[in-house]
Image: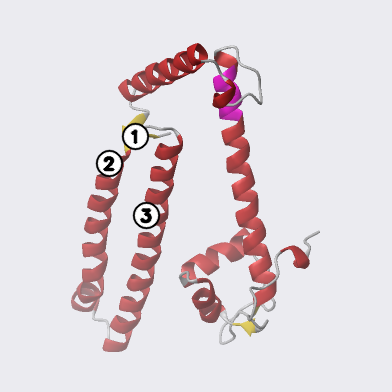
Amino acid sequence: MSDARRHPLPDGVVDAELNRGQLARAFGVSEPTIDRWIGDGMPVLEQGTNGRSYKFLLSACWQWKAEREEAETQATEAGERAVQQMRLALIGGEVGDGERGLSPKQRTELYEAEYKWSQAARARGELAYTAAVDELFEEVFTTVRDAVVSLPDRLQRECGLSNRQVEKAVTACDDALDEAARKIADGIRALRAGSQQANGHDIKLN
């Protein structure tokens, strides 16, 4: 069972019932993200229906979000521990030694093994330089952004949308672009952090 005391609202934040748009603004995400979180199990105080808005209790949603992020962090850390254990096992080190506990010869063997593995993985197409991934993200997002920005005008011309409908389409497109930009930025930060941890410049592609 969840324990609300582990993840209380930040100091100075008063608990309240929020609608979908308010919750999105409170968490700094788009409304489509809120919809996805609902599907992932975020607690809903009152289901939305035609003419009736969703209702959420801020503290319950905050707790769910914090526990979800905590679980993701723990899973990542567990994966990194497994990687370190395997790396040590390959050169005969003991689990828990860490690289600082290795002899200079063992560290050399470890780094050589990692280098050979990364070279072979890159040759198989499983690794790419993070700079190349950054460039690809930027190129793809620019293409998508240009298409999405022009979409409302195109719909007005080809489908005869009213001005009000065009305004709604612009808002929806802006929300989608904001969410995509946020995810790309988060992804690039994760790639760079991963490269720094690995003391290299690669990212695994699958």
Tell which circle, 2 or 3, labels the residue nearer the N-terminal end: 2
What segment carries the magenta color? 82-88
Residue where numbered disc 1 is placed = 201
Q: Is residue 100 above or below residue 149?
A: above
Q: Residues within 10 Å of mark 2 (few under 14, many from 20)?
A: some
Our reading of the magenta stretch's main secondary structure is: helix
Q: Nearer the viewer, residue 196 or 31?
A: 196
Between the residue at mark 1 and the residue at mark 3, the CA separation in whole angstroms equals 18 Å
Q: Secondary structure at mark 3?
A: helix
Residue 193 in sight: yes
Q: Is residue 131 above or below residue 25?
A: above
Q: Nearer the viewer, residue 176 or 183?
A: 183
Looking at the image, which residue is at 41% across and 15% down? 112
Q: Is residue 200 above or below residue 18?
A: above
Dot 1 and dot 2 residues touching (CB under 8 Å): yes
Residue where numbered disc 2 is placed = 131
Give the quarter of the image for residue 192: top left
Q: Residues within 10 Å of mark 1 (few under 14, many from 20)?
A: some
Between the residue at mark 1 and the residue at mark 2, the CA separation in whole angstroms equals 8 Å
Residue 16: where, in percent of width, then height?
Answer: 66, 84
Q: Residues within 10 Å of mark 3 (few under 14, many from 20)?
A: some
Residue where numbered disc 3 is placed = 184
Give the quarter of the image for residue 145: bottom left
Q: Nearer the viewer, residue 172 or 125?
A: 125
Residue 164: where, in percent of width, then height?
Answer: 31, 88
Residue 117: where, in percent of width, then height?
Answer: 41, 19
Tell which circle, 1 or 3, labels the residue nearer the N-terminal end: 3
- Position of the C terminus, as image quadrant, is top left
Whether the magenta-drawn stretch holds residue 70 is answered as no
Q: Amino acid at mark 1?
A: His
